[in-house]
Every structure is written in structure tokens, then in C-alpha cells.
Image (cartoon, grey):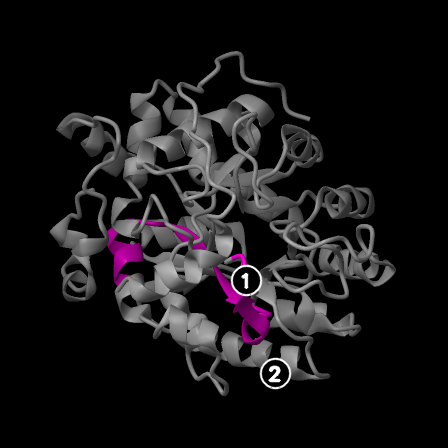
Amino acid sequence: MSRQMGTRYYRSGIGPLSRRSVLGRLLAAAGIAGCGTRAARSENAASAVDVSTRLADLGMQLDAQQRAAGVAFLDRHTTVDTHSHPGRFFLKQLPYETPTTRAFGGAFEERSVAELRAGHVSGAVFAAVADMRLLELSATGGLHAAAAFQPGEAFADYQRQIAELKTLVKDPELAKGLRPADIDAARRHHQTAAIFAVEGGDFIEDRLDRVHEAFRDGVRVITVVHYHVNQIGDIQTEAPVHAGLTALGKSIIGEMNRAGIIVDLAHATLAVTKNVLDASTKPVMISHTNLATPTLSHPRLISTEHAKLVAAAGGIIGSWPSGIGQTTFADYIDSIQRLVDAVGIDHAAIGTDMDANYRPVLRSYLDWSLIPAALLARGMRDAEVAKIMGGNFQRLFGANVSQGSQ
């Protein structure tokens, strides 16, 4: 366990959120919705970039020099988004249509890839959505699985989305992110490394060999549960069914460790997290969440105890710019600082959920440089910001892949 930093970075609180405003409304919000970019690197992408997604009001002051410091930071350091859905690629070549897929609208990979590159993002975890075909809005506005998978359905949808990722990564602006060195190389070559992921382990079913097949497909992260209570364990947004991690789930965690795939515990309950930490031989991550506070609770947020357990095992937590308890970009910077205060500088990261987020307070990779700009302006040292922006993920990635079948 890394020592806690002596400096406390948290500055201001986050206001309460109505319990009626739940995560599931991201579908309508994201589906209806349609720092400085240096022309030398972005000329080819400029026509595809949608500048309307940029933040106009940050809720904080950043002067021109501070903004420039954020842009310059990206030239010096490898940066990684631990969870994203660029351009909603998971909607391409859909063999089915649901109210949820209609709410999301169409895919827009070209624009998103252009924004990744224009924003100088070294690497991003591109997450397929394993339970997409099951998802509907509940009566209370939350996302939930309205049905169960038929045998083979989850794997077929996995294959569709992985095929789309393999096509997408042929774009010259992208590179394959199979190991940490690929992300460093992408930064040097002015590309973005796409780290393949699957949000939900449903596609594995009871076939442990599919974990290794996924690794061969290029998958390096699996978020073991999502909105469907699957064969692996319980989720934050439904009543417990398994009382934590299942026996099969424990076997799947073991295979992920052996293959070299990062275990992502976003959406998993505290009980699942404790069980996974007991079973895993590798550090894990929670790719996108924030800490609950005395004035803010929500099923998708985690307690300080929850976060510290992951950190104590060498893992990381990605801070999430969602509309849950955050209304401005400044609120998001507060959340990052609160997380650092709780778990230490070596265990915080950035997980945007880009292009499928709920009321995002960071809407485009064009504003990626504002995160280091704001953290530096708040008094963090360059080396500390470098850990949050990508260094901690790179360490975790290396710890998982080093003994895997590369």
C-alpha cells in the first residue's frame, strides 16, 4: 500500500443530487445530443471535430498561461482515459433495435477519433457494451436489464463489437494498445492507442477459454459486471442475487489474471470487490466512479472504504466526470482531489465514460488538456498530475500484462 500524500487537495464540496436523477437517463441525454488544438498536429482531423461539444463555462478561472500549461503537459507525459466508448462504436452493424439503441442515436467514430487526436490523448480504453441488447430504462429512469440472454446471444454481440473495434483501429490516427509501451509509442507518434475492453463479462458465459480468446482478440480490460446481473456477480444498481462473487466468477478472475487482462470492478458491489481482491493475484481497477460524501449518495458511487480496499491491493480508481453530484468542470476537479486525498496519489486516474456518459461535465477530448491545467493550477506538482493522467494506469497495465500471454 502506497503512503498517503501529506498535502490535501480537496477544496470545495459537491451539492446533493436528487435521487430521481439516476444514471440511466444518460441514454436520453447522450442520444439526443448531437484547449487549444495545434494545427500542425490536427489539420487532417479539423473537419471532423465538433467544437460545439467544448466547455464554455468551467465553473472556475483558468487564464491563458494556465491553459497553455495543460497543453504543454500533454507533450511531456503519456495520458490515458481508463474508460470510454468513442463515437459509440458499439452501435455499428446492429442486428437488433431497442428503445435504448434508438435513444443513443447513431455512431460517430470519425468525429470521436479526430477529437482524441486533436486533444492529444495518448491512450483510451475503448469499451464494448456486453449487455447492450438487454438494456432499457426502468420506471424510475435508471438503466436495467429487461431480459436475460439466450444461449450464445452475448457472445454473438461480443463478436460484432470486437469486429468493429478491429476495423476502427485501422484508422491511421489510432494504434493498438496491447501493452504499456504501445501507449508511450502512440504519444510519440501523435496517435491514440486503443486499449480494447468489454463492459460486462456476460459473453464469457461458463466458457473460461473465452477469456483467452478475448486476449487474442486484443482485449486487455474486462469490466466484469455492468447493468445485467450476470454469472460473475452482483451489481450496484440491483438487489444482490449472489451475495458477492460467484464460484464461476472466481474462476473467471483467475483466468483473467493468467491471460493478462485487467479486472475492472466498475458497477460491482462492495461484496464483489472484496471477493475479487481475495481471489486476484493482480491489482485491479474501478475505471469510472467517484466517492460518495455525507451529502451525496448514489448506487454508482463508492465509499471511501471501498476505494481504499482497491488502493491497498495496488489498484486504481478512475474519477468520472458525470452529472451525478457534479454540475461543472470545477466540481469534477474537486472530485479528483477528494479521491487523491482518500487513496493517495498513486491510486487515482481519469475515467471519462466519453460518448456514453450521464450529463457529462467533460464532453469532448478537445478539452482533455483542461484536466492537467486545472490540477496544476490547484497546486499539484507536475509528477503528481502525471500519475493521475496516465502513469498509474500504465503501472497497473504492466502489472497485469507482464505475466500474461503476450
In the image, residue 175 sits, relative to residue 390, either above or below, namely: below
Label 1 vs 2, first from the N-terminus: 1
Where is the N terminus found, in terms of image quarters? top right
In the image, residue 228 sits, relative to residue 369, either above or below, namely: below
Q: In this figure, which residue is indicated by the disc labeled 1? A: 139
User: Between residues 284 and 288, which one lies in front from this camera angle?
Assistant: 288
Would you call the spot at circle 1 few (<14 residues within 10 Å), some (14-19), or many (20 or more)? Answer: few
Which residue is located at x 73 percent, y 53 percent? 239
Tell me the tag on residue 156: 2
Which residue is located at x 75 percent, y 48 percent? 272
Q: Determine which quarter of the picture holds residue 337.
A: top left
Q: Position of residue 324 (x, y in %)?
A: 46, 42
Outermost bottom residue: 95
Whole-angstrom CA distance, mark 1 to mark 2, is 29 Å
Q: Secondary structure at mark 2?
A: helix
Task: Mark 1 and mark 2 in contact? Answer it, CB < 8 Å.
Answer: no
Where is the C terminus found, in terms of image quarters? bottom right
Q: Secondary structure at mark 1?
A: loop
Relative to 20, is 360 on the left or the right?
left
In the image, residue 51 sits, relative to residue 275, either above or below, namely: below
Residue 212 visible in image: no
Which residue is located at x 68 percent, y 54 percent? 235
- The magenta span reads 113-140
Let me know if residue 383 is in the magenta part.
Answer: no
Tell me the tag on residue 238: none
Depth check, mark 1 against mark 2: the one in front is 1
**Residue kind at label 1, given as amino acid type:** Ala
**Residue kind at label 2, given as amino acid type:** Ala
